[in-house]
Image (cartoon, rainbow, N blue to C red):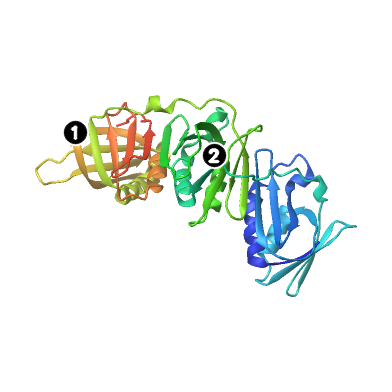
Amino acid sequence: MRVSVLQDQLARGLGIVSRAVDSRPTMPVMANVALATDDSQLRLAAINDKMSITTYIGAKVDEAGAITLPAKTLNELVNNLSQEHVDLRLDDKTQTVNVRCGMTVSNIRGISADEFPLIPDSGDPDVLVPGQTLREMINQTVFAAAREETRPILTGVYTHFDGPTLTLAAADGYRLAVRTAQLEHSIEGSAELVVPAKALVEVARIIADDDTVGITLPGERALVLFYTQNTVISSQLLDGKFPDFGAIIPKRYTTSTVVYTSDLLRACKRAEIFARDSNYSARIVVQPATAPNEPGEVRVTGKSAERGDNEGMVDASVEGEAIEVAFNIRYLIDVLSVIDDERVIIESMGAASPGVLRLEDRDDFIHVIMPMSVTK
């Protein structure tokens, strides 16, 4: 193999695929990135027991070939090279790649590409989703997935294709995020799958604004593939049935509050500084207007027995009765941080009931947060 690539493109490509390198490899080759020529491109790939990432970068190929190189070593080296052409030359006898860039010469010992696991092919897409739409849907749900493996199914994101409607939902037992979208390109019938949240995080990371993401749904293997123009991500699916999340979404409320998203987010971030010492419990008090033409208010309070307290007040439009409820302030920050809409609606039936966040002018997003006990 003799190939020349630009340093910035190689660094970017390695940054993408290295996120799939096995952190605890069962075989030495699983700690490597595979490099292979493909016409006028260099293909980079990494795989672990749950997902694989393949990306292509432009290259000048003088001699075809393939090799796997230690991901960490290659990444660190390339990121510290000057922004020039990087020349890679493989010695097949020693499985060593000579790396030249400017005045720098390095030699990296690798492992034969024949020992690298087979990477799934992309095939033809079953459905196409606008990149911006899919990225927004992922970002507005994936944070609510569970991080602990006590209930493995909750570490994934429920993904439902039903004709032109795509639904993503994630829950960890304390909160639920649901986002829907209407697609121009739809599938016949329906398909339900649960994709590991970690895989969807990587999908969102590679999507460019003008991308269209192709999705190949599971066939004989429990595998889903996402691909853009230059990158393919395959992921194993989680086995099991996702909970019936529709049943936990409250259908009624006694208080509805409309508030500016950015104002409430800043108030929550200030309260979080002090709420850390109380298991991130923060008190939310909603007060309707006391006089005509006056705004209502939302007060967010975080307290620390050792470090003090913070209370922030935000003007709001309140319909219904006054309420006081405690939420995990980190959960509020998480959801408010992924809402781009100017204002958000908060619905509640009081301290013992879940809080519901909706968007003011859209009905494609809903978030449910379970309350915490209110302490005086």
Can residue 14 be seen by looking at this rendering? no
Q: Residue furthest right?
A: 93
**Residue indicated by mark 1:** 320
Q: Residues within 10 Å of mark 2 (few under 14, many from 20)?
A: many
Q: Quadrant of the C terminus?
A: top left
Residue occupying image coordinates x 23% and y 33%: 255
Q: Give the foreground label among 1 and 2.
A: 2
The answer to which of marks 1 and 2 sits earlier in the sequence is 2
Can residue 300 be seen by looking at this rendering? yes
- Of residues 346 and 199, the one nearer the viewer is 199
Q: Are marks 1 and 2 in contact (CB under 8 Å)?
A: no
Q: Position of residue 32 (x, y in %)?
A: 74, 50
Residue flagged by tag 1: what amino acid is it?
Answer: Gly
- Of residues 140 and 165, the one nearer the viewer is 165
Image height of 129 relative to 62, above or below: above
Image height of 117 relative to 91, above or below: above
Q: Residue furthest bottom?
A: 103
**Residue indicated by mark 2:** 197
Q: Quadrant of the N terminus?
A: bottom right
Residue occupying image coordinates x 20% and y 39%: 318
Tell me how far mark 1 sits from mark 2, CA to CA.
37 Å
Secondary structure state at the residue bearing disc 2: helix
Residue occupying image coordinates x 31% and y 47%: 264
- Of residues 84 and 268, the one nearer the viewer is 84
Q: Which of the 4 image quarters holds residue 346?
A: top left
Q: Position of residue 293 (x, y in %)?
A: 11, 46
Residue flagged by tag 2: what amino acid is it?
Answer: Ala
- Of residues 290 and 82, the one nearer the viewer is 82
